[in-house]
Amino acid sequence: MSETKRLSIFPLSGALLFPGMHLPLHIFEERYRALINDAMARDRQIGMVQPKEAGKHPALFDIGCLGKIIDIEALEDGRFNVVLEGVARFRIVEEIDASTAFRQVRAEIEDDQELDEVLASAERAALEIESRKFADLQGYQVDWDSIGRLDDTAFVNGIAQIAPFDAASKQAWLGQSRRDDHPAAGIFRPPGWRRRSGHVTMTNESATDGKRAIDPELLEILVCPISRGPLVHDAEAQELISETAGLAYPIRDGIPVMLIEEARKL
């Protein structure tokens, strides 16, 4: 059963948050500093959602992810470095005519307990096998022992966060109903994953050569999850460099992957 509540939202192109995943952000705009102050005074939660277009008041996708502030650093000039943890998906019902500088909506929050179903053991095994093949093909360094300890929901959401699909494909993945896709498993598959002869196969249909341009606004907002410091964009290598932490975070199809385990040591 879903819950309907009022949410303060942060529309940000190219930055998708999935339940159970983390997203480090640098908050410098006045309206979003107000958003963080408001969230900290209430329940530490904000809604991350992608805009459909550019502009001062763009239309929004219907589906976003509720994020909880699990770490915050208040800087002297009023800016913040925060880390969000995805809590649950939400569907926007309507936008509220609010007096705040930041936008607010009324949204239905997914009940995680409804979605805590599991993959059949054969499906889980097949998904891990195909994930290993795809990671090897892309040259990713993956801690498979840690992956094996994840529950099914965290496993699939983790794939969603790091897979080299463009923002539109990931938005479709975020918005796809798990129950509609596979009633027994209660888990959804991204664009580019195919089911054939009882097993799951990952293709690279939605991925490009990784050279898609990254949103400049996103570059200003992202910070290193370790140092909380700024990142330098290496357009040729398609990486965000944290000189303080000595790490390079990959950019895959225009989407930065801000996961420490995915970063390259300098």
Image (spheres, helix red, strand yellow):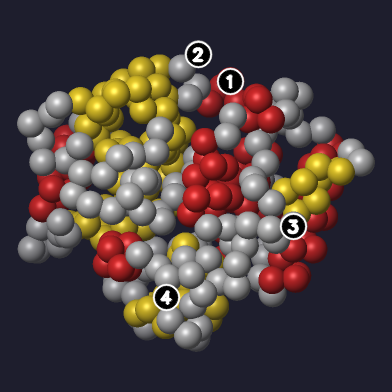
Whole-angstrom CA distance, mark 3 to mark 1, is: 29 Å
Image-based side of 87 in relation to 37, left or right: right
Which residue position is annotated with label 4?
240
Seen at 40% across and 54% down, the residue is: 15
The location of residue 21, given as percent across then percent down, is 49, 48
Q: In the image, which is nearer the foreground, mark 3 or mark 1?
A: 3
Seen at 92% across and 41% down, the residue is: 197
Residue closer to the observer: 39 or 110: 110
Q: Are marks 3 and 1 in contact (CB under 8 Å)?
A: no
Q: Which mark is residue 1?
A: 2
Residue closer to the observer: 130 or 52: 52
Q: Quadrant of residue 164?
A: bottom right
Whole-angstrom CA distance, mark 2 to mark 1, is: 7 Å
Q: In the image, which is nearer the foreground, mark 3 or mark 2?
A: 3
Which residue position is annotated with label 1?
114
Question: Callout 1: helix, strand or loop?
Answer: helix
The location of residue 33, given as percent across then percent down, is 15, 50
Question: Callout 2: helix, strand or loop?
Answer: loop
Residue closer to the observer: 142 or 134: 134
Image-based side of 160 in relation to 80, left or right: right
Q: Which mark is residue 203?
A: 3
Image-based side of 49 in relation to 33, left or right: right
Residue 258 vertical placement versus 125 (above, below): below
Amino acid at circle 4: Leu
